Amino acid sequence: MGAGIAVPMQKTFGLRGKIINTNIKLKHPIAILTGRVFNLITKAKSSGKPTLRSLHMTITQMRDIALLNGIKRIAMPKIGCGLDRLQWGEVREIIKKEFEFTDIEILVCVWE
């Protein structure tokens, strides 16, 4: 949580402490719901880069967690496409595929 959108998210929501307090073994890839925020941990080190496969795995986990918790709306940035350098078209297709047969609404916001 040292660069990109993670910095303002950490400042606003205090995610680092909340993740630690979950007592979940932090392996990657993993999706964790802390309060109202999904944390998609796609790489072992913050300096690394995720793969489409690791991001896909966390998106699938996020979908399952949302379904279990009755979450109907998710707002997110173009995940994986800033400093992580994944291509939005590919990420978008993964999100569409994983949420296609759910009633969960996805809103993608552009961070400026």
Image: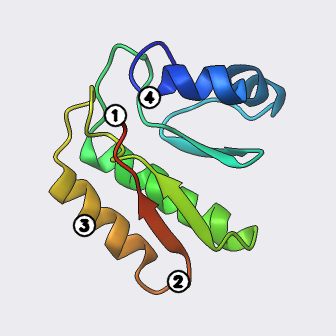
Disc 3 target residue: 93
Marks 4 and 3 sit apart, C-alpha to C-alpha, by 21 Å
Residue at the spot 36% in from the left edge and 54% down from the top edge: 56
Residue 5 is tagged as: 4
- Between marks 3 and 1, how big is the CA–CA gap? 23 Å
Query: Badges 3 and 1: C-beta atoms under 8 Å apart?
Result: no
Tag 2 residue: 102
* Viewer-side label of 4, 3: 4
Callout 4 crowding tier (Cα within 10 Å): few <14, some 14–19, many ≥20: some
Where is residue 79 drawn, in percent x and y? 36, 44
- Give the image location of residue 65, x and y in percent: 66, 62
Choose between 31 and 107: the one closer to the eye.
107
- Amino acid at the residue labelled 3: Glu
Q: Answer with left or right where residue 72 lies relative to residue 70.
A: left
Name which of mark 2 and mark 3 comes first in the sequence.
Answer: 3
Q: Nearer the viewer, mark 3 or mark 1?
A: 1
Q: Secondary structure at mark 2?
A: loop
First of labels 3, 1 by sequence position? 3
Residue 91 at what x, y percent from top left?
A: 26, 55
Dot 3 alpha-carbon crowd within 10 angstroms: few under 14, some 14 to 19, many 20 or more: few
The residue tagged 1 is 112
**Which corner quadrant of the image does residue 3 belong to?**
top left
Residue at the (69%, 69%) spot, across then down: 71
Would you identify the image quadrant in which residue 15 lies?
top right
